[in-house]
Image (cartoon, helix red, strand yellow):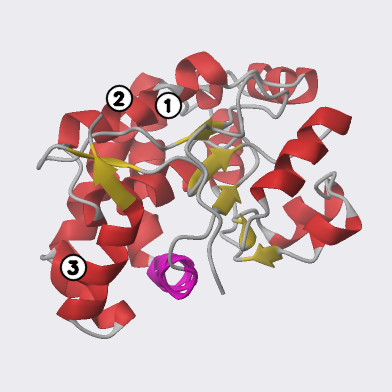
Amino acid sequence: MLVKKMTVKIIENSKINNIRDLGGTETKKGHVLKNNLFIRCAVPMNIGKIEHENLMELDPAAIIDFRGVEEAKKNPPNLTKELAKKRVHLPIEPKVWSTLNQLNDTNSLNDKTFQETLKEAYEKYTTENLEVYKEFLRILFKNVGKPIMFHCTAGKDRTGFAAALIFLILNVKRETIFKDYLLSNINFKPPKNITKEVSLIGAERLVKVDREWLEAGLKKFFSVVEDIDDFAESLIGNHDRLEMYTSQCLERKP
């Protein structure tokens, strides 16, 4: 089956919250990620006809949802029947809220405990959810050259960690990884209900991202994984398959 080549980004100026195409990101060796392969975003809600048309044109092989089970039930994504068939649920339960609420109830929530809680949450992406991310990568590896869309609720934490893994496998510079991650501080527009909730527990920074959180998560990841190429090869099969996969994701810088 031939994969349709698309040079222009289909997802541009979308109403989907915190959405961006990772295409155009430069690697250490001077290549760039192809457009329309890796689309990260917040949960696709309240989107219009143009967004649906763009998604249908993109024709993703999978729309991966990292939200927890109850979290996803409360707010199902606003997708057409055709697109809903592409949805793959890989739940990572959101435990940060309950931890911050407990700290707030015991008057223990402050800058230090807030940072510790969020850094621990990112570390748990490895200690508790590594199998979820492995399955995410297996889906990517099985769909060489085909678009993959992935999201959580805000598209910044669980989704941000997933994007970082893609970048690492494709040999993107560390600072470039953080640059994309921190874009959520500009792109994510928190809904009123979320703004109200974080305000009630005094955790307004929860609608943002912080470099320290991802640094803590990647440090824990590499304490377990050690070598990203070996990790990726164990999931895709061997070195040659990984080389073939990465070559299909990259093109020469214009």
* C-alpha separation, residue under disc 3 versus residue under disc 1: 24 Å
Could you tell me the amino acid type at mark 1? Val
Say which label, 1 or 2, has the lower sequence index: 2
Q: In the rendered view, does 34 fall on the left or right side of 229?
A: right
Q: Which residues are magenta?
A: 129-143
Q: Is residue 22 above or below residue 168?
A: above
Give the position of the C terminus as an image quadrant: top left
Residue 27's quadrant in the figure? top left
In terms of secondary structure, where does tag 1 sit? loop
Q: In the rendered view, does 165 fall on the left or right side of 40?
A: left
The residue mark sitting in front, 2 or 3, is 2
Q: In the rendered view, does 58 fall on the left or right side of 232?
A: right
Give the position of the N terminus as an image quadrant: bottom right
Query: 178 or 115: which is nearer to us?
Result: 178
- Image location (x, y in percent) of residue 59: 68, 54
Query: 90 or 168: which is nearer to us?
Result: 168
Mark 3, residue position: 225
